[in-house]
Image (tube, rainbow, N blue to C red):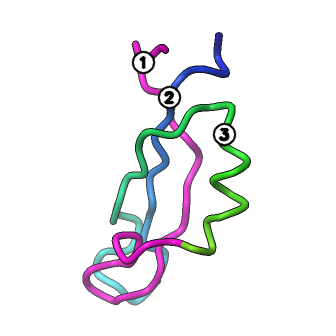
Amino acid sequence: MEQSREIEIPIICETNQCENYGKIVNVVRGIRFKDLDLFYENFDDSVEQDKCPICGELGVAEDPILVKGAFS
């Protein structure tokens, strides 16, 4: 059952000098737990929304979060 659960992956700014350091710059939604490996394999092809709006650096994907009540 867990394999069909949807997850969210927060993207965090990790640039020490940025005032946005440690804050979420994007949340990737709509990924199923079973497809998590595919996300990490293709994360290098990240979109512009994963860049910090303040420093412009690409954010870092944090641990996925299971979305409560999302089944298919």
In this rendering, position of residue 29 left or right of residue 1: left
Q: Earlier in the sequence, mark 2 or mark 3?
A: 2
Dot 3 lies on which element?
helix
Q: Earlier in the sequence, mark 1 or mark 2?
A: 2
In this rendering, position of residue 44 left or right of residue 41: left
Amino acid at dot 2: Glu
In this rendering, position of residue 53 left or right of residue 3: left
Q: Residues within 10 Å of mark 2 (few under 14, many from 20)?
A: many
Camera-nearest residue between 15 and 7: 7
Dot 2 lies on which element?
strand
Q: Are marks 2 and 3 in contact (CB under 8 Å)?
A: no
Residue appearing at x 57%, y 33% in the figure: 32
Circle 3 residue: 35
Amino acid at dot 1: Ala
| 12 vs 20: above or below | above
Q: Quadrant of residue 33?
A: top right
Q: Are marks 1 and 2 in contact (CB under 8 Å)?
A: yes
Q: Quadrant of residue 25?
A: bottom left
Give the quarter of the figure containing the N terminus.
Answer: top right
What whole-number distance in Å separates the C-alpha atoms at marks 2 and 3? 9 Å
| 72 vs 59: above or below | above
Q: Are marks 1 and 3 in contact (CB under 8 Å)?
A: no
Q: Residues within 10 Å of mark 3 (few under 14, many from 20)?
A: few
What whole-number distance in Å separates the C-alpha atoms at marks 1 and 2? 6 Å
Specify the farthest residue to the front.
Answer: 72
Residue appearing at x 55%, y 54% in the figure: 62
Residue 56 position, x and y percent, is 36, 88
Does the magenta portion include 36? Answer: no
Circle 2 residue: 6
Residue range highlighted in magenta: 46-72
Residue 54 position, x and y percent, is 26, 85
Circle 1 residue: 70
